Image (tube, rainbow, N blue to C red):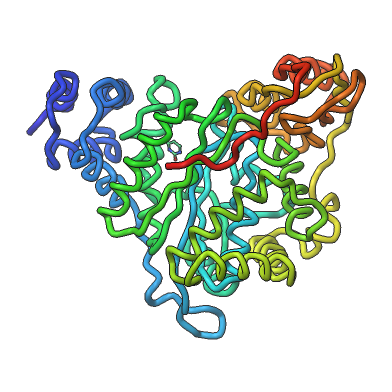
Amino acid sequence: MVLPQEIIAKKCAGQTLSEIDIGLFVDGLMSSNFNDAQVGAMAMAIFLQGLNKQETVYLTNAMMKSGKVLSWGKVKNTDGLLLNGPILDKHSTGGVGDKVSFMLAAIIAACGGYVPMISGRGLGHTGGTADKLESIAGFNVQPKLEQFQRIVADLGMAIISQTPELAPADRRLYAIRDVTATVASIPLITASILSKKLAAGLDVLVMDIKVGNGALMTELDQARALAKNITTVANNAGVNTQAIITDMNQVLGNTAGNALEINETVKYLTGKLREPRLHKVVVSLAKAMLINSQLAADEKSAFFQIDRALASGKAAEIFAKMISALGGPNDLLEKPWRSMNKAEVIIDVLAPCHGYINTMNTRDIGLSVVSLGGGRTSNDQIIDHSVGFDCILPIGTKVNKGDVLARVHASSKLNAELASQQYIKALVFSDVSVPEAKVIYRF
Ligand code: URA
């Protein structure tokens, strides 16, 4: 019997772990054979010494197999028909104002794909897709897996939160990494994300690797290394995977906060407002998903299909049906605020000077949403979905003193004023114009 401390010592000394060592660690995560201190020590050993490709594959596979692995071959829709398209998904490494999953899944479903999206909660300063969906009264992010699969078969998409049945070993490891400063490790992030994605039984995956001051990876070379690691491991595991590196040096879209982001999604899907940077990210990810799954033969066909999915209203209709199939209202698109709470207090954030918005400390804006109550500072905290920022002006905008930079939505006047001050502090203004900020980086 190999003791946990022997496996930890091996990694601490920079040695390579065998498949058996890693299997014992993952079994230990499930059975508590590794106690919390030992899991933390192991996470730190990996954080400091790294894992090679083969070890990362072993960890990914063992964590994937710690729970159910979905298969789609025998899943039928309500009419008794088997799926007639590819199973595909995207995963983002997280950011502020990142509501891409909603529009993207709906577009892909409208183009004939099936998107079983298992999303995360907010983490640190970043928002979580599952939290955003819970802004909607009645929406159930934890349906039974059979119901989830049936909705995907009927509509082409469903978005839920991670369930205890899928990659449970990652749930425990992730919770311990979160409090032991071991999140930002490329092999651990790779295994964590891919164990969940591979458990969903995908044919095609597109990774949105965020880079910038609001992302997990703040530097481009780190983002590229993560992108390379994830694509190598996932492609080796048989899932056609591409990574796209996108900018997170400013809030994506013009809202940050749970219900506000759902409202922006509704505006996007119904064509009322499509913030250009957000649209660019949605289109590049959608294009990659359509081409890699052979739903589109080339870029031209992919653009045509994306455009048609939005212009015809089909993507919006699928999203609305998914909301009601999972317990939400039937009229989210028509009356979003009928089923979401509005904040008590809304105030304008006013520009303190003339000039151009030069930089935005995106992480601090995300933390400000958390301080307003829109994210968690402890695991079991109940969040206030109504709070956050909207009408956010992008980097490069020219403003005069007193112009509205954004609006704060808060539960009290005091909180609103504090958040307004934090928002102003997060911006740097310049006298000269700013070159157009990049949205997609070359990988
Ligand atoms: N998202 C995950 O699911 N896991 C990580 O480790 C980081 C981001």
Q: Give x and y (percent) for residue 18.
A: 12, 38
Q: Is residue 184 left or right of residue 122?
A: left
Q: Is residue 105 above or below residue 407?
A: below
Looking at the figure, which quarter contains the N terminus? top left
Residue 27 figure quarter:
top left
Q: Is residue 143 above or below residue 150?
A: above
Q: How many marks?
A: 0
Q: Kindly indicate the quadrant of the structure image that contains residue 152.
A: bottom right
Q: Residue at x 70, y 71 (%)?
A: 314
Identified at 41% across, 27% down, the residue is 183
| Residue 64 screen position, x and y as percent | 31, 50
Residue shown at the point (25%, 46%) measured from the top left: 62
Residue at x-position 60% and y-position 48%: 281
Residue lying furthest left: 1
Q: Quadrant of the C terminus?
A: top left
Q: Quadrant of residue 221?
A: top left
Nearest the eye: 182 or 378: 182
